[in-house]
Amino acid sequence: MADPVKKKMLREEFVTYAYLILYIALSSGQIFFNKWVLSSKEINFPYPLGLTLLHMLFSSVLCFLLTKGFKVLKVEEGMTLEIYTTSVVPIGAMFAMTLWLGNTAYLYISVAFAQMLKAIMPVAVFILGVAAGLEIMSCRMLLIMSVISFGVLVASYGEINISWIGVVYQMGGVVGEALRLIFMEILVKRKGLKLNPISLMYYVSPCSALCLFIPWLFLEKPKMDAHGIWNLQPVVLMLNSLCTFALNLSVFLVISHTSALTIRVAGVVKDWVVVLVSALLFADTKLTVINILGYGIAIAGVAAYNNHKLKREASRNISDNSQDAPTIPMTTSLNPNR
């Protein structure tokens, strides 16, 4: 009897590790893919708005086909027009802003430096959370936020080719993502709506596509018309969009088969993979000892922040004593640039 049980446990562990490796590979690979598409002279598509809009349109169509057409995946019920207009629309707008600004930053700064700047995310989430009454200022949290901020400052000081325009775009993306997470906590969770990653993409993607279409129409479409960019490489762009959707699907699989702690550890591993591998792939990435030291300090602060959040979420889950479907942790992002 022990052998079948042991085999089943080994099989489950293998599947879990396979999903984690898939998530890390897709998440880091998507970042590299976006950077290559936006900066490559061979592809010649330096249009972050257009690329992000394509991602959202592709996700909208695929989500509809998989949930309503082939019924392979299930969308969580409970969505109403009132919840959609007051909750999903703001979340979709912030998601669009995050992706737009984050992809635009790749035109000015290296992938590694962009990843280092993203380590400031917990600080932005915490400050906005305090302002919204979701977080409580304490000496412990102030120390953690200080460590993260100091680490990011050290990493920035060590950057050789710094572009302040790129920094502004990246920080704008960080603020947008922090606002999205805060809106999810205030507007969705407090209304009792449980959204897994697939449900979130099903509801948010069309809204984000519309929010991106309007600025694209005025900011990038005239440039694309002037440069004759419509003669592009559709296979590459469709593969890029497919990878984005596959990444979101892998998030769903990871959340369904692992714990919140495992997800966060995988996220930290992915961050280091992106920083180190990008130095080998892209000519504009030149890491220094100060870069690595600063980023290491920031990641230590992020780990302390995640530990704090996990303990609070664990106590909240015990008090709720719920057995609902797996939902997205507050610090887990569906942003392909994360």
Image (cartoon, grey):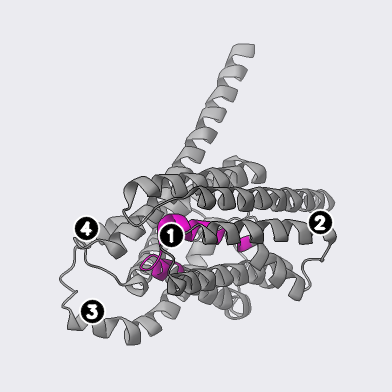
Image coordinates for residue 40, horizontal then vertical, percent? 25, 61
Q: Marks 3 and 1, how far apart in space?
A: 32 Å
Q: Amino acid at mark 2?
A: Arg
Q: Earlier in the sequence, mark 3 or mark 1?
A: 1
Q: Main secondary structure of the magenta part?
A: helix
Image coordinates for residue 160, horizontal then vertical, percent? 43, 59
The answer to whether one can see residue 1 in this image is no
The residues colored magenta run: 102-121
Q: Residues within 10 Å of mark 1 (few under 14, many from 20)?
A: some
Of residues 2 and 208, the one nearer the viewer is 208
Looking at the rendered structure, the secondary structure element under dot 3 is helix
Q: Which residue is found at the position 23% from the left and 79% from the top? A: 224
Q: Earlier in the sequence, mark 2 or mark 3?
A: 2
Q: Residues within 10 Å of mark 2 (few under 14, many from 20)?
A: few
Name the residue carrying label 3: 224
Q: Which residue is found at the position 65% from the left and 52% from the top? A: 302
Q: Earlier in the sequence, mark 3 or mark 4?
A: 3
Check residue 235 in the rendering and tell me which mark sits there, or answer none: 4
Name the residue carrying label 2: 140
Q: Is residue 170 left or right of residue 221?
A: right
Compared to residue 142, the image places residue 216 above or below, namely below
In this view, the residue farthest toward the bottom is: 218
Compared to residue 263, the image places residue 187 above or below, namely below
Image coordinates for residue 63, horizontal then vertical, percent? 43, 61
Nearest-to-viewer mark from 4 and 1: 1
- Asked whether disc 2 touches disc 3, contact meaning CB atoms under 8 Å apart, the reply is no
Of residues 248 and 101, the one nearer the viewer is 101
Name the residue carrying label 1: 160
